[in-house]
Image (tube, coloured by chain):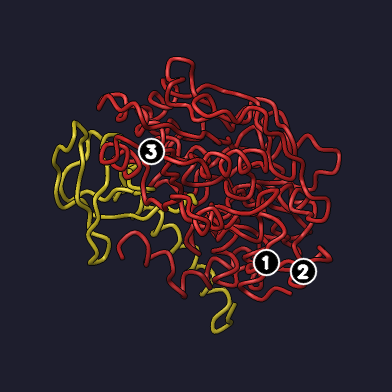
Amino acid sequence: MCLGIPGKIVEIYQSNGLRMGKLDFGGVTREACLEYVPEAKIGDYALIHVGFALNLVSEQEAQETLELLRQISEIENSLQPGEIG
Amino acid sequence: MKHLSEYRDADLVRGVLGEIKRTVTCPWVIMEICGGQTHAIMRYGLDQLLPQDLELVHGPGCPVCVTSLELIDKALAIASQPGVIFTSYGDMLRVPSSGNDLFSIRASGGDVRVVYTPLDAVKLAYQNPEKQVVFFAIGFETTAPANCMSVLQAKTMGLENYSVLVSHVRVPPAMKAILSSPHNRVQGFLAAGHVCAVMGYWEYPPIVEQYKVPVVVTGFEPLDILQGILLTLRQLEQGRAEAENAYSRVVTFEGNRKAQAIIDQVFTDCDRKWRGIGIIPASGWCMRDEYAKFDAEKRFPVSHINSEESTICIAGQILQGLKKPIECPAFSGRCTPENPLGATMVSSEGACAAYYQYSRR
């Protein structure tokens, strides 16, 4: 139910007084309402849930999280080379 | 897909799993709130890769599962009326009520339709001025911004034939109800990432303070979940209890303030009956009086409907983390996704459906 998918905003327009957008989900394009992310611009990634953007996805935070996970992983691999799981 | 596939990297999963194993020194019980997380844990087999000392229990975060029988009976009563187009998200159609389900209303001639977004229901109301279009607004905080916007949009468009059957539930009161139970086993929470995308996590420090439990905002991909588990474990092992964020690419402490303001404009707090659990005070949202004409419970005569739960299904105990689906005598025998006794077997996010689908029997 609370499924949210990150999509890339490729178009922004008004429809029936609402700020809407077209988003690309890995090749599939769908419409979503952008009223809750007034700062959104083309090229941004937004988290979409039941046709609404709930937030923008922060590229910087994403990179920092991945870097942290890589560091944990590297420490682990250096401690237990070859062990799986 | 960007912002998804990176968080399924097998090498990183292995690395974080190793770190989790080295961190655990004694048994702990952690609850993942959201049904979407329960399914991800089962789908990727994370429950079988984690150390045995770490027990994951599955929380009440499945809106289809916790929507009360009474509201489903009301939905059926409205949907079977002539001149009504009844709309909802797909999961809701198969949930058993006291009698039948929404699918059977459709089979007997009712106009029941699945919509992807509540704005589609508003569009149906605009296109069918001679019909009453009702949207069954179930969900947690995640879904509330969409449902509220549909009401505002109907108002802006001057629609007189759109109403919403509101069944909104909120996560923090449910967490408090679980923690206050004398039978509680939960020692730490993975908070539901997409609820927090809307609400932020400013509501959690008081809970952390009062109950001394770690609460870690957690996403839905394997690495998100493992990171959430690792941060919770570190707190437990170090004797700390804090509200932390393991899903910072989507969630901020404040959340989406504009969405929160719109929710507050349209909805107000109310007591809510949770299926299988009972009434939790101030655990739901209902329509404010200013928007009463969009409230389906006021537009249709359903206030007399009062339904009681089946006594066979143990969904209530499962939703509170007290029991696992396999402890139910009906699981996978009398109760299957094809013939569900309770909502936790129906919904694609229900814990029983997850155990059934991924063969944890």
Tag shown at residue B146: 3
Residues B138 and B2: in front is B138
| Residue depicted at 55% across the width and 70% down the height | B43
| Marks 2 and 3, how far apart at CA | 37 Å
| In front of the other: B95 or B48 | B95
Chain letter of mark 2 equals B
- Chain letter, disc 1 residue: B
The residue that appears at 73% across and 66% down in the rendered structure is B335
Farthest residue, direction top: B290
Q: Amino acid at mark 1?
A: Asn
Whether tag 2 and tag 3 are in contact, CB under 8 A, the answer is no
Quadrant in which the N terminus of chain B is drawn: bottom left
Mark 2: amino acid: Arg
Q: How far across and down, in percent of the image, does residue B205 sit? A: 59, 30
Q: Most extreme residue toward the bottom, as rendered?
A: A82
Horizontal side of residue A41 vs B359, given as left or right: left
Which residue is denoted by mark 2 in the rendering?
Answer: B334
Shown colour of chain B? red
Image quarter for residue B146? Answer: top left
Q: Are marks 1 and 2 in contact (CB under 8 Å)?
A: yes
Q: What's the CA distance linking mark 1 and mark 2? A: 7 Å
Q: Quadrant of residue B151?
A: top left
First in sequence: mark 2 or mark 3? 3
Rendered image: mark on residue B339: 1
Question: Tell me, what hue is chain A?
Answer: yellow
Please tell me if label 3 and label 1 are on a single chain: yes
